[in-house]
Amino acid sequence: MINIVLFGKPGAGKGTQAEFLKEKYKLTHISTGDVFRFNLKNDTELGKQARVYMDAGDLVPDELTTKMLIDEVNKHPDTNGVLFDGYPRTLSQAEALDVFLESIGSKVAATVALEADDEILIQRLLERGKTSGRVDDQDEEKIRNRYQEYNEKTAPLMDFYKNQDKFFIVDGIGSIAEITERVSAVIDNL
Ligand code: B4P
């Protein structure tokens, strides 16, 4: 299994790049944001619990998120590898992911961070909010809260992966195809 973590601030393009990378490398794409949104839409118990956090732009509690993530990975026992999109987002999630992957004889091969300036990203999200119907994309205050959550809880993961020599930074500004090339160059060199 070759497992790649796509890392970056909200709107950095993780989901956008994952759509291309999953085809190119035949990986299973798991977006925790998408799985949560599916549960919200279908009004499941998990959706009901996650909604209040997501709508406010807060992270969903670790216990709920990690259980959901493990359930998703377990649905694909024969996969070539997983493209983790939006997970882990806290140190506790990163540690839980390592423990889980080790239990199935696997590990994170690399974490690829898409880097871009906050103000550009906020504009991207507001633009998407015009058509996505996502409550968390429509209000600048909620978007700024997502960046605060990122700075406080997710940014520390950079050191976690740097200390394991698994952290690769890619410039997230440019055309979608250019960025796919940059991420591919990292994966091809692993
Ligand atoms: P996510 O669904 O992961 O959303 P995201 O960070 O907004 O998106 P992403 O970086 O994938 O951006 P995208 O490609 O879509 O999370 C939403 C919420 O779910 C979180 O706030 C949290 O509440 C919850 N959640 C999810 N995972 C969790 C976890 N592990 N723990 C706790 N809570 C969790 O791109 C954004 C926009 O930019 C798009 O409109 C796209 O078209 C555009 N774009 C992309 N690339 C571009 C480029 N190169 N140039 C111009 N525009 C571009």
Image (tube, grey):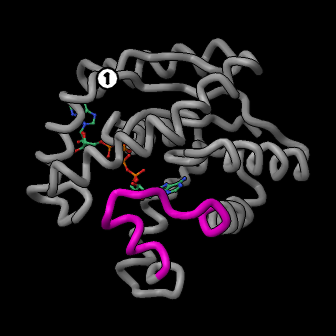
Quarter of the image with the C terminus in it: top right
Quarter of the image with the N terminus in it: top right
Picture quadrant where residue 11 is located: top left
The residue nearer to you, when weighing 17 against 8, is 8
The residue nearer to you, when weighing 54 against 172, is 54
Q: Give the range drawn in magenta.
A: 49-65
For the stretch drawn in magenta, the main secondary structure is helix
Q: Residue 38's x, y, as percent?
A: 42, 73
Q: Please report the residue visible at 59 percent of the width from the left and 36 percent of the height from the top.
A: 5
Q: Residue 40's x, y, as percent?
A: 39, 77
Q: Is residue 56 left or right of residue 36?
A: left
Residue 162 on the magenta span: no
The residue nearer to you, when weighing 26 against 98, is 98
Q: Is mark 1 on a helix, strand or loop?
A: loop
Q: Please report the residue visible at 39 percent of the width from the left and 36 percent of the height from the top.
A: 9
Q: Please report the residue visible at 67 percent of the width from the left and 18 percent of the height from the top.
A: 162
Q: Please report the residue visible at 67 percent of the width from the left and 49 percent of the height from the top.
A: 93
Above or below, 190 against 85 in this view is above
Above or below, 113 against 148 in this view is above
Q: Mark 1 points at which residue?
A: 116
Q: In this view, does 91 lie to the left or right of 45?
A: right
Q: Residue 157's x, y, as percent?
A: 61, 32
- Amino acid, disc 1: Ala
